[in-house]
Image (cartoon, helix red, strand yellow):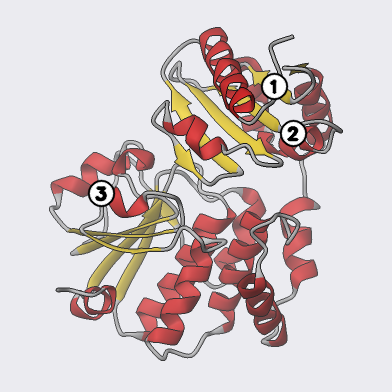
């Protein structure tokens, strides 16, 4: 039986990719794996469905990123690694182009059920706080020294998916790993500044407008915000991450679930759920074909915004009632 180590050692030309609009965990894990494979003497390219966001451009000091352009050929590859996702459908229009080459597909991910995705070989642990943490494990298992660039990528993965160590998934492994990375020279304050202190002047107004669109439901246990195409277009022009509304809403007293619904340009609705307490939002989005973690999950819903909003509210209500929660108000 081929192990993941065999897969890494047995192939020569790798393409690394992740989900559309790659976040900090996805990009940080790609950075770390790129440097691991280079240390093993491999040819490696990172090709994402979308360009790297301005907040993450500091990574390009040491790691080359590219994104798929319809008019440009992909680099040569024999193996593809999906990071922070397990399904080719999450890579948008890039997915069919990858399939045409008939490579070996592998997955490195920490989301529930990722071993049942499109990878023929997987390195998956749903208890891991971040995909980048799994790449760190690979360095140890393969006895490859961790370079500074990879350390920075792993640190980015950790802070992205633990909310700078505020979430319940910030476990002993996370703090031990963060301590190791800082001791190796990673500058956490510099990363924080790069991520959060270079915002477009319009970002404050966008945050205010997005928060203004929220409402409370289900006895104050659900906060739901719906962002239409017009606001999403403004956000795109300012490179504003609309997920910034999630934490302010989750901080409200009595809130158990926050739902953020974003109308996409193709007519679908991207829904992100965040939970406090015992609500399992991964189970909620699974009913719509989505995935994630118990307290953070998402799904793309192929229906109008109003229908998606009603469906999510009903599903959250059902989950709360199962836990002895509230009736609709």
Q: What residue is shown with label 1?
A: 225
Q: What residue is shown with label 3?
A: 118
Image: 74 above or below 157: above
For the N terminus, the quadrant is bottom left
Residue at figure coordinates x 46%, y 58% from the top left: 126
Q: Nearer the viewer, residue 123 or 84?
A: 123
Residue 44: % across, % down: 33, 70
Q: What residue is shown with label 2?
A: 245
Whether residue 241 is visible here, answered yes or no, is no
| Residue 122 sits in quarter | bottom left
Comes first in the chain, label 2 or label 1: 1
Residue at figure coordinates x 49%, y 10% from the top left: 304
Residue at figure coordinates x 61%, y 74% from the top left: 173
Mark-to-mark CA distance, 2 and 3: 32 Å
Residue 324: % across, % down: 67, 27
Side (left or right) of 27 relative to 189: left
Comes first in the chain, label 3 or label 1: 3
Residue 316: % across, % down: 60, 24
- Does dot 1 land on a helix, a strand or a loop? strand
């Amino acid at each position: 039986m081929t192990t993941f180590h065999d897969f890494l050692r047995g192939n020569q030309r790798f393409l690394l990719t992740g989900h559309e609009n790659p976040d900090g965990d996805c990009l940080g894990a790609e950075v770390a794996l790129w440097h691991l494979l280079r240390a093993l003497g491999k040819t490696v390219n990172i090709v994402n469905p979308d360009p790297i966001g301005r907040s993450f451009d500091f990574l390009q000091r040491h790691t080359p990123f590219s994104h798929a352009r319809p008019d440009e050929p992909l680099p040569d590859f024999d193996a593809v690694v999906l990071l922070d996702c397990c399904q080719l459908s999450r890579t948008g229009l890039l997915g069919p182009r990858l399939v045409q080459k008939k490579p070996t597909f592998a997955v490195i991910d920490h989301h529930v059920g990722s071993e049942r995705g499109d990878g023929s070989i997987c390195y998956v642990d749903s208890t891991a706080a971040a995909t980048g943490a799994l790449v760190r494990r690979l360095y140890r298992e393969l006895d490859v020294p961790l370079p500074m660039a990879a350390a920075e990528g792993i640190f980015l993965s950790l802070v992205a998916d633990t909310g700078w160590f505020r979430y319940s998934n910030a476990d002993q492994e996370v703090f031990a790993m963060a301590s190791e990375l800082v001791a190796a020279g990673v500058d956490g304050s510099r990363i924080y500044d790069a991520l959060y202190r270079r915002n477009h002047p319009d970002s404050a107004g966008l945050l205010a407008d997005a928060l203004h669109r929220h409402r409370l439901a289900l006895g104050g246990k659900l906060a739901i915000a719906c962002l239409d195409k017009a606001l999403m277009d403004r956000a795109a022009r300012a490179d504003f991450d609309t997920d910034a509304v999630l934490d302010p809403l989750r901080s409200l007293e009595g809130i158990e679930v926050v739902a953020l619904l974003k109308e996409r340009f193709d007519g679908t609705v991207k829904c992100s759920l965040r939970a406090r307490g015992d609500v399992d939002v991964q189970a909620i989005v699974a009913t719509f074909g989505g995935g994630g973690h118990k307290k953070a999950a998402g799904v793309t819903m192929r229906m109008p915004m109003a229908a998606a909003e009603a469906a999510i509210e009903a599903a959250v209500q059902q989950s709360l009632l199962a836990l002895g929660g509230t009736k609709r108000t």
